[in-house]
Image (cartoon, helix red, strand yellow):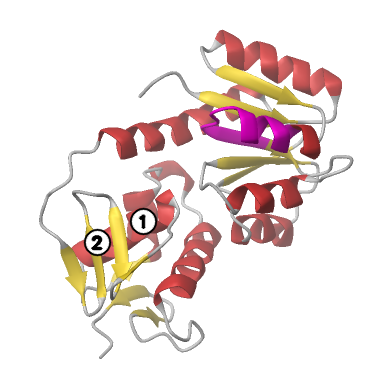
């Protein structure tokens, strides 16, 4: 994978300049922006691999910026926020964020979280796919092309949604725990997050189920985990 570029949207100048300096020294290409509108303009002009967005910014806040970007891209997005409430974390994850870090934060911790996203991007770019299609009912994945389908319709999945679906198909009709799913997709043994799994399962259901509230394919086994079944 080529040099990774990071869009940093942060209205606090000291933090923005610090991140620009520290991440540039790590070898990343950094595009700093003072507000959401400037960040969105940079996103449209430049090749951006990862976004780091402050939640509260003038003109266009971090959530609305992410929503605009999600209309066109599934790049990993890490949120910076001063609010450390569980509901806030669940909200930004459900809206499409990939990670969440509370201010004040350690630059070393942020670098570690960025490195996790870079490893995932590298794996996606370099993975040698098995050419055999994976299928369960009318859901299928073509690993050779990195595409997923519901019937004849191609699914627009984020990287994590695709990895989740592929893992479910590789283990179709097998009951998988949330911890198994987290370790398989996020590959972070030390940081298991129950809410992260539930949020991404919900987003995946919205794309593969006719009625996500009454799923026929991706079934919940309360207190245990999930199973992908034919559903016919």
The stretch drawn in magenta includes residue 85: no
Q: Earlier in the sequence, mark 2 or mark 1?
A: 2
Residue in view at x 38 percent, y 44 percent: 189
Q: Quadrant of the N terminus?
A: top left
Q: Nearer the viewer, residue 110 or 44?
A: 44
Q: Which residue is mark 1?
A: 162
CB atoms of marks 2 and 1 within 8 Å = yes
- Residue found 34% across the figure and 54% down from its top: 163
Q: Residues within 10 Å of mark 1 (few under 14, many from 20)?
A: many
Q: Residue furthest left?
A: 132
Q: Which residue is mark 2?
A: 141
Q: What number is the disc on residue 105?
A: none
SS class of the residue under badge 1? helix
Q: Quadrant of residue 59?
A: top right
Q: Is residue 4 above or below residue 128?
A: above
Q: Is residue 199 left or right of residue 230?
A: right
Residue furthest right as drawn? 58
Q: Secondary structure at mark 2?
A: strand
Q: Is residue 103 above or below residue 74?
A: above
Residue 50: x %, y % from top left: 55, 34
Mark 2 nearby-residue class (10 Å; few <14, some 14–19, many ≥20): many
When asked about the image quadrant of residue 162, the answer is: bottom left
| Quadrant of the drawing holding the C terminus | bottom left
Q: Is residue 122 left or right of residue 206?
A: left
Q: Was residue 48 drawn as part of the magenta stretch in this picture?
A: yes
- Residue 13 in picture, x, y percent from top left: 85, 21
Coordinates of residue 67 in the picture (x, y in percent): 67, 53
Q: Which residues are magenta?
A: 39-52
Is residue 34 rendered to the left or right of residue 228? right
């Amino acid at each position: 994978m080529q040099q990774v570029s990071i869009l940093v949207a942060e209205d606090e100048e000291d933090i923005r300049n610090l991140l620009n300096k520290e991440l540039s020294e790590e070898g990343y290409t950094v595009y700093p922006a003072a507000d959401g509108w400037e960040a969105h303009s940079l996103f449209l002009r430049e090749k951006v691999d990862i976004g780091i967005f402050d939640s509260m910014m003038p003109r266009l806040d971090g959530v609305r910026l992410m929503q605009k970007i999600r209309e066109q891209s599934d790049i990993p997005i890490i949120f910076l926020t001063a609010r450390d409430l569980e509901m806030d974390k669940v909200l930004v994850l459900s809206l499409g964020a990939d990670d969440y870090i509370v201010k004040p934060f350690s630059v070393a911790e942020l670098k570690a979280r960025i490195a996790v996203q870079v490893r995932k991007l590298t794996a996606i770019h370099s993975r040698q796919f098995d050419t055999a299609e994976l299928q369960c009912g009318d859901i299928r994945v073509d690993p050779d092309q990195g595409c997923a389908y519901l019937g004849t319709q191609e699914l627009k999945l984020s990287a994590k949604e695709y990895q989740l679906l592929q893992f479910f198909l590789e283990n179709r009709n097998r009951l998988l725990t949330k911890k198994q799913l987290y370790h398989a997709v996020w590959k972070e043994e030390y940081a298991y997050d129950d809410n992260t799994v539930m949020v991404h399962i919900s987003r995946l259901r919205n794309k593969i189920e006719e009625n996500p509230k009454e799923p026929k394919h991706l079934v919940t086994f309360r207190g245990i985990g999930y199973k992908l079944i034919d559903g016919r």
